[in-house]
Image: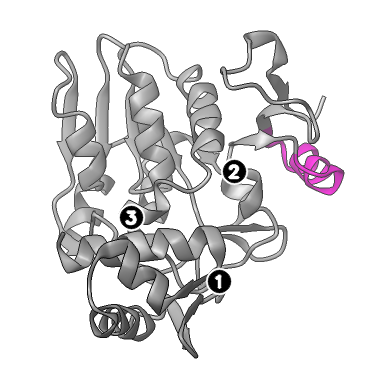
Amino acid sequence: MLAVERRNLILEKLQNERKVVVGELSTLFDVSEETIRRDLDKLERDGLAVKSYGGAVLNENTGMDMPFNVRKKRNMKAKQEIASLVAGLVQEGEHIIVDPSTTAVAVVKALKSRKKLTVVTSSIEVLIELSDVSGWEVICTGGTLRENYLTLVGSRAADVISSFQADKAILSCKGVDLERGVTDAHESLSQIKHTMLKSARQRILAVDHTKFGNVAFSRICELSEIDMVVTDIRPQQKWMDYFAEKGIQCLYDREEGQKQTDDFPEKGTECLHDGT
């Protein structure tokens, strides 16, 4: 096992359990405790963990973000539910822009039954996911690779995105706040996502319920600039009131506390609210 793979598995364990113990990790991965300590040193330097006596705890600082391969396993059911709803909004033959989020990967997976779409993306993972799809036009933005995010950023990426006018831009984020707007962990990501929004006629924000009320480092846009919010659980009433005031549609999968099943909900359980 490569060191980076082991560190990602340690990060997954940290996410699930909030702390790890050197001795337990040494046994789990069949490596020396010194090797595990070096792994934890690297995670601490990256700002992802805080070393403690005999192990480490997860860095809860909301300004930090996990590597893509770790984040894509977080809240997987919610992302699948959201992706199913978003896929229902995309029509055959449309031109869409998708951002470099883990939610976007779930969305394009849900769209693969379409016969013809044009997709513009800066996401390496989305490009890989669509590499076996025929009949689609998949456009890569180019740009500079952002470490740990599997995405392309920078002026070249922004210039390519700006040259298009898509039917829909579909993006996610790290935080949604009534006052601070839509935010992400890094300025380079926020700039690309803001450019995506400006290059589409309809702007769809796809976020699970844990993102509401969070504020990350860099602003993407004001919440009022979004046309539709798609989420897994009905937001609190203050959010619904704001959406109604601003004319933002809200599409969600279920009410909070509604019983979940292992299967996707039927169409009859989906709720579309547009302030009426």
Residue 221 seen in this snapshot? no
In which quadrant of the rendered image does the N terminus lie? bottom left
Is 235 positioned to the left or the right of 84 in the image?
A: right
Q: Main secondary structure of the magenta part?
A: helix
Is 33 positioned to the left or the right of 186 in the image?
A: left
SS class, disc 2: loop
Discs 3, 1 touching: Cβ within 8 Å:
no
Residue 258 percent coordinates (x, y): 78, 28
Say which residue label 1 marks: 62
Q: Residue lying furthest bottom in this view?
A: 53
Picture quadrant of residue 188: bottom left
Chain part drawn in magenta: 235-249
Identify the mark at residue 208; answer none if there is no mark. 2
Which residue: 33% across, 62% down? 28
SS class, disc 3: helix
- Packing grade of label 2 (10 A; few <14, some 14-19, many >=20) is many
Residue in front for this viewpoint, 8 or 76: 8
Q: Earlier in the sequence, mark 1 or mark 2?
A: 1
Residue 35 lies in the magenta stretch? no
